[in-house]
Amino acid sequence: MSPIVRIAAAVAAAGLLAAGCSRQGAAPSASVAAIPVTLQANWYAEAEYGGYYEALAKGYFKDEGLDVRIAQGGPGALPVQKVAAGQVEFGLARSDDLMLAVQEGLPVLMVAAQVEHDPQIILLHAQSPVTGFKDLDGRSIMAEPGSAWITYLEQKFSIRIHTIPENYGIAQFIADPGFIQQGFLTAEPFVCGQMKVATRSLLIADSGYDPYRALFCSRAFAAAHPDRVRAFIRASNRGWRDYLSGDASPGNTLITRDHSDSTPEVLAFGDAELRRAHIVDGDAGKGERIGLIRRRRLEEQIAILHQVGLLRAPLPVDRVARFDLLPDDLRDLAEH
């Protein structure tokens, strides 16, 4: 059973649980203007979430009338389930996973990009004979079972990849010079470097499989509270601009508070990689911007998922995303 099908099977139970419990964050009193909302991250606090933490640290969410809590992710965080069940207002996930969730009937909706390009990599030892995606034929990769990018690579390059279930560790990679695993541009290479293990990597986005990492909410929340969604996006984008071009230390202080493994050294490495590869802001020459999701690019992603057999039929883009909630400077770009 695929991860998204498991999500669809579990979301009804999650909804019943939510109905019997109070929502995350109590309603504000008459004397408190800020409205509580929760952002459920899909992993532990790291540089990839820097813009949200920067907005939190500098009061940008408060400026927009929002009292934001960032809930830690990690294995079992299940942001799609929690948003679909109404347990949290916002979540972060890859756009391909959200498309598959919509196919299974989950009422989730992309409203902005967390980052323009996916920082996922295939991590290799420096001496590995693998120099390109075709060289992965017949090899084993430790990755999340059912990952759409594996199916895409197999079909595009006419190869077969054996998947070792992800254990979210790096010990096997360190111990075995022939081991290959999924990772993040901003994380595992740093850890390996600290352990004097030389690495190389293939950025999965360079294969042509390049989903957004997206900010999403439920369809019902977007319909009932479009002003809150717009406010959250404005504050987040403002935070990302500061984090990438200004003093990132306020946000990084909160990241380290929430996840002690994200030390200043780890975050400095992650920040540098985000800037170097333009993971968050994308390529300005191609019209990419912080927070921007584009109709045409989502259509292309849907076509790829249908082509590789992960979508039973092409989905209308408007079932998976709304573009009218983006800030004014992005809204026109989104439709082109």
Image: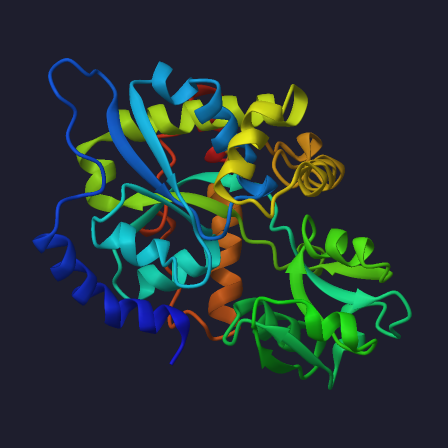
Q: Classify 93 as above or below 308.
A: above
Color style of the picture: rainbow
Left or right side of 169 for 87: left
Rendered residue at 50%/75% (across/down): 146
* Nearest the eye: 328 or 70: 70
Query: How many numbered discs sit on the rendered protein?
Result: 0
Q: Quadrant of residue 282?
A: top right
Q: Classify 316 as above or below 136.
A: above
> In which quadrant is the N terminus drawn?
bottom left
Q: Quadrant of residue 89?
A: top left
* Nearest the eye: 124 or 111: 124
* Nearest the eye: 145 or 75: 75
Report if residue 293 is visible in the image. no
Rendered residue at 67%/84% (across/down): 160
Q: Classify 30 as above or below 319.
A: above
Left or right side of 109 for 311: right
Q: Looking at this rendering, what residue extends furthest in the right direction?
A: 127
Q: Position of residue 126 (x, y in %)?
A: 88, 65
Q: Looking at this rendering, what residue extends furthest in the left direction?
A: 20
Q: Quadrant of residue 249?
A: top right
Q: Position of residue 92 (x, y in %)?
A: 43, 47
Report if residue 198 is visible in the image. yes
Q: Position of residue 256 (x, y in %)?
A: 56, 38
Rendered residue at 82%/54% (across/down): 193
Left or right side of 102 for 166: right
Q: Position of residue 107 (x, y in %)?
A: 25, 54
Rendered residue at 61%/34% (across/down): 288
Left or right side of 115 for 31: left
